[in-house]
Image (cartoon, rainbow, N blue to C red):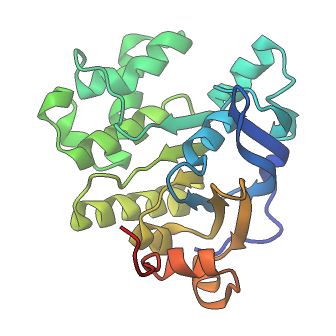
Amino acid sequence: METSTGSAIVISVHGLRIGYGSRVLLENASFDVRRGEILVILGGSGSGKSSLMKNIIGLYRPMAGDIRIAGKSIVSASSGDKAMLQRSLGVMYQSGALFGSLTVLENVRFPLDQFTDLGLDEKNLTARLLLRQVEMGSAESLMPGELSGGMLKRAGIARAMALGCDILMLDEPSAGLDPITAANLDRTILTLRDSLGFTFVVVTHELQSIFAIADRAIMLDPVSRSIIAQGKPAELRDGSTDPRVRQFFNRQPTAVHPGSP
């Protein structure tokens, strides 16, 4: 899973402060994502994991700092340039976010319908190829309500790939899945990276998935509102001197003091 340290930087986050109104979730955050890498963003509830991802893809504007996609700022970009940068990022949200009134094929085809001038046959062919890449080739005529949780996630990944991007942003892909389904989805993510060269930024707190797929992880802390660790998951688990990092990676409960509820 290890990527070359010489790989090009495809996402660069520098001095980022994010939040809502006057509430700051994360400040002075800086990190890079390299081509072909699987970077996991992790941390406890309220640490700003999903908000960080939404800032990276340009849904929210940071309070301070910059985010560069392939060297271009998505923060200061014009509306047209921002839209182009956003199309270079495929996004799968936690629920899969499929349209309930469309078949699986139509859902995957939807970005092509919206943003390309391809003919219907070409769009259907592309959608079918994408579904095969996520092991969903036999499900194209099904409706979202007929899919299992794992199938919804796979269809969501296929749709995220539709516009030919090579960076995929996944929000809690293993959430709500049984261990076998989650492991199969982890395998699909690794296959897409290893065979097709995708770069992944994955928001998750699922330890088994983190150790299965992550080349590198960054850990957010809601109390200090900062990145408190960056590195390979096994090294963070075994070598960090920060008790918050050790507690998370070793799945240790919070100490209970006498008299506390």
Q: How many labels does the image show?
A: 0
- Report x, y in % for residue 153: 33, 43
204 or 45, nearer to the observer: 45
Farthest residue to the left: give it: 146
Vertical side of 253 occupied by 181: above or below: above
Q: Which residue is situated farthest in the front direction here?
A: 259
Which residue occupies 67% across, 89% down? Answer: 239
Residue 253 x %, y %: 42, 77
Quadrant of image for the N terminus: bottom right
Residue in the picture at 81% in, 56% down: 8
Measured as percent of width and height from the top left, residue 66 is found at 86, 38
Q: Is residue 161 above or below residue 214?
A: above
Comparing 26 with 179, the one in front is 26
Q: Residue 53 falls in which quadrant of the image?
A: top right
In the image: residue 40, left or right of residue 174: right
Which residue sits at x=72%, y=58%? Answer: 224
**Quick check: can you spot residue 116?**
no
Where residue 41 appears, x then y in whole percent? 60, 57
Quadrant showing the C terminus: bottom left
Which residue sits at x=22%, y=22%? 103
Identify which residue, 188 or 15, lies in the foreground. Answer: 15
- Please say if 225 is above or below 62: below
Q: In this view, does 87 lie above or below 110?
A: below
